[in-house]
Image: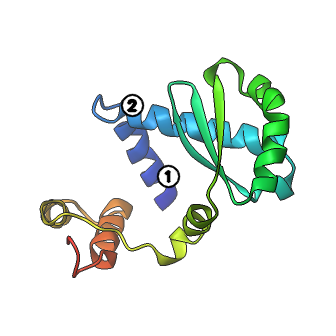
Amino acid sequence: MATSKVSYFLDILSKTPAHQNLFISANQIIQIQRILQKTISPQLAKRCLIGKFSEGILVIYVDSSAIAAKLKHITPSLLKKFGSQVNTIQIIVNNQGYKNAISLSANYKPQLSQKAAQNLSELVLVIPMSPLRTAVESLLHNCKPDELC
């Protein structure tokens, strides 16, 4: 039930003019990630990380030059699978960044400006108990208190 409420909220938010571009970009990256996962082997997919996608250029981070060479070899077939939305694939070997991105969820503490934390605190006071309120409270509780929060 909580998932459907969050999904409903995200659906409404995605239709607001201020957030439409963000949701369009996120959906494009999700679609590209799915195509990549279906196209390459699972062993190769585990070592690739979608970076950014902008103006037809897709950046894929890999953890070694051997993986980069394998991806470069299949780039033409990847471009065909992605269709017209991807014109160029850039493969970047970034061992440290790749490892950091993979472990990000385990070590990540959100950082908020004082103004953002204040606004979220005020929001919590006015919205009824809901999954959204619980999520905002959790965000405020988990942000780094000594940093920008």
Q: Amino acid at mark 2?
A: Asn
Sequence-first tag of 1 and 2: 1
- Residue 121, image x, y percentages: 16, 67
Q: Label 1's element?
A: helix
Disc number lying in front (1 or 2): 2
Q: Is residue 80 left or right of residue 4?
A: right
Q: Residue at x 20, y 65 (%)?
A: 124
Seen from the viewer's position, the closer of residues 31 and 67 is 67
Q: Residue at x 44, y 72 (%)?
A: 108
Q: Residue at x 20, y 70 (%)?
A: 148
Residue found farthest to the bottom: 146
- Coloring scheme used: rainbow
Q: Is residue 93 above or below residue 53?
A: below
The residue wearing badge 2 is 21
- Residue 123, image x, y percentages: 17, 60
In the rendering, which numbered label is found on residue 40? none
Residue found farthest to the top: 84
Q: Is residue 48 above or below residue 113?
A: above
- Residue 40, image x, y percentages: 84, 44
The residue wearing badge 1 is 4
Q: Is residue 149 above or below residue 57?
A: below
